[in-house]
Amino acid sequence: MDTPQRLRLLSLAVVVVGVVVALVGGLIFSYLAFSLSRAKADTAQLIRIQKIQSNLLSADATATNAFLVGGLEPPAQRAVYDEALSSTSSLIVEAAQAQPADAAALSALNQQVVSYAATIEQARANNRQGLPVGAQYLRNASADLRSTALPILDNLVSSNAARAAEEMDVRVGYVFPVISLLALAGVIVGQLWLARRFKRKINVGMLASAAVLLILTVGGLIAAQQLGSTLSSIANGSFAAVNTAADARIDANNAKSNESLTLIARGSGQAFEDAWKSSADSVAGNVQRLGERPELVTQWQAYTDVHGKIRELDDGGKWDSAVDLATGSAPDSSNTVFGTFDQNLAGYLDEVSQDASSSLANAQPAIVVGAILILLGGLAAAFLGRWGIAARLKEYR
């Protein structure tokens, strides 16, 4: 094979290498941008599912607390209950539309929510008439909620959290620097052959092509590392805080519901009190981990102190006084103290949820720009290398 033929083959090889770098790099970084978009969507879906959990347990806590009053429940509590269930229904529809993979589970959940609401209505109707069977309907509704609806939500939370975490995996981004480095090595080998064959140390076109590939290699590696660092910060920061705060709010409302169920049982509610303790311990641990909001620790402790007083009154034979403290609206009542904690925790949860979503959204534009620059850079490397070799081919014409 004569020298012109070898030069043509080298020119073709440089063009192919440049185009491959451009296409592979553009595709990889486009995929990363798409993954960030999916991670944002999965995070939003996770937040919806967690809100459904919180709303259901908040509704149950409100219903059980209102039940203690006897007769016609307070209008304000009825409004809170209705709002919680209405919000739950809306979120179920929204979640099913946002993530088709969850549609079947959400449909089953919706049936359980409808069944729960119907049983609660039966409990209320009997309670207004002073019939003891109303308490059994209420216990059945709460038990079914925990045995059927909540497991569905737990599975949905796990699957969406796993999807979001998977989409935030940027290891594929390190494939591009490897490919670009191999391309750079190939261009350097071609440059060395040209230097030996033509007795010239530098071919301007090939040198420029190698420089572009070097920039792409270093830039791609830095971009992958920075993206990984950003996503790790999100995963360990706002995303983790969303899960921790949501778990705390879910367990807190579960505890509040069991507080009322213990009183409704009138002396035979140890199982509900044990459930309260389990949930309360979980809340205490989670709010401790939320270092940004130390006041939540204090507010939760204030509620547990009130709960302790309720238990003292009930265990001491003062059931009516215990019910008054559990259902009243005084500043030191369970409802007021718990309401302060729940409101602040809900506000914090909204903040970190927004932070997680916006952080993922903010990372996307840079990745899109990177994909465009890599595409252009790879094509530039191909053009410059071909131009440099074309200069040597002219010497044979």
Image (tube, rainbow, N blue to C red):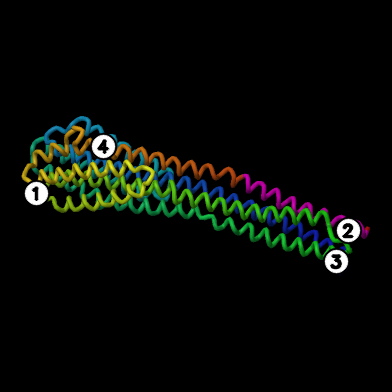
Write down the quadrant of residue 338 in the picture: top left
Q: CA distance from mark 4 to mark 1?
A: 26 Å
Q: Which mark is residue 393?
A: 2
Q: Secondary structure at mark 2?
A: helix
- The picture places residue 159, in percent across and down from the top left corner, at 40, 54
Observer-nearest of 384 and 45: 384
Q: Residue at x 93, y 58 (%)?
A: 397
Q: Nearer the viewer, mark 4 or mark 1?
A: 4
State the image coordinates of residue 149 (x, y, percent, origin top left): 28, 49
Span highlighted in magenta in the image? 369-396
Above or below for 183 versus 90: below
In the image, farthest residue toward the left: 317
Where does residue 240 sit, x and y in percent of width and height?
41, 50
1 and 2 marks in contact (CB < 8 Å)? no
Q: Nearer the viewer, residue 391 or 335?
A: 335
Circle 4 sits on which residue?
339
Q: CA distance from mark 4 to mark 3?
A: 81 Å
Q: Quadrant of residue 10?
A: bottom right
SS state under label 3: helix
State the residue position of label 1: 267
As displayed, is residue 295 above or below residue 15? Answer: above
Q: Which residue position holds label 3?
A: 196
Marks 2,3: beta carbons within 8 A: no
